[in-house]
Image (cartoon, rainbow, N blue to C red):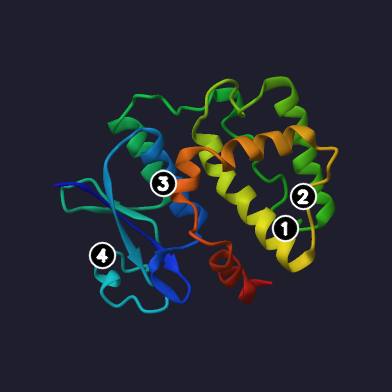
Amino acid sequence: MAIEVCVKAADGASDVLGDCPFCQRVLLTLEEKKVPYETKLVDLGDKPQFLEINPDGKVPVINFGDGKWIADSDVITQLIEGKYPEPSLATPPEFASFLKSKDSDDGTEQALLDELRALDEHLKDHGPFIGGENISAVDLSLAPKLFHLKVALGHFKSWTVPEDLKHVHAYTELVFNRESFVKTNAEKEEYLIAGWAPKL
């Protein structure tokens, strides 16, 4: 039985891949490891059947073919790494906690800029990826969030990453154009924007 992954459908288009960075992280991990899988799109606004799979109603969830559904992108990506160790996506231990928020209550623009400047400095010394020459799990977690940042803040706040953060720009160009990212990204940016509209 093939691996099945339940992921978010686009708001207002239940047959189109949605904009969840946690779902994309799982799909990116499978794509980078070239593991075949079947995607099941879940309309989070109408999910009575899905609640039988995951009573919490949250995506992503994965079934490795044994009929057992597993939730939480952290858990899922670790299981994928364990079951399919090649190519390794393990992040070098010294970078595994990179860019974890220092203060989850600080949502200011300055806090964001501080984090991006720290990322830029890190990439200058260790790039092109966070762990060096090879893409790793931390990139697959961070890239979808950076894409959301770019699209949502660009649309709603006319905000962009400062031009002087050249290494961040090079990094996002590299990961956003990677085949796995293009394949697993929300099909159209308007779906991502629609998903963010009620939150901003």
* Of callouts 1 and 2, the N-terminal one: 1
List x then y, in percent, for residue 116: 76, 41
* Of callouts 3 and 2, the N-terminal one: 3
List x then y, in percent, for residue 43: 38, 72
Q: Which mark is residue 105?
A: 1
Crowd rating for badge 2 (residues with CA inside 10 Å; few <14, some 14–19, many 20+): some
Crowd rating for badge 4 (residues with CA inside 10 Å; few <14, some 14–19, many 20+): some
Q: Is residue 58 visible?
A: no
Identify the residue at horizontal 46%, vertical 27% (top origin): 90
**Label 3 sits on residue:** 26
Q: Which mark is residue 53?
A: 4
* Of callouts 4 and 3, the N-terminal one: 3
Secondary structure at numbered mark 2? helix
Identify the residue at horizontal 47%, vertical 39% (top origin): 179
* Of callouts 4 and 1, the N-terminal one: 4
* Amino acid type, residue under disc 4 in the picture: Ile
For the residue pair 95 and 44, the one nearer the viewer reads as 44
**Label 2 sits on residue:** 112
For the residue pair 115 and 175, the one nearer the viewer reads as 175
User: Of the residues tagged 4 and 3, which is closer to the observer?
Assistant: 3
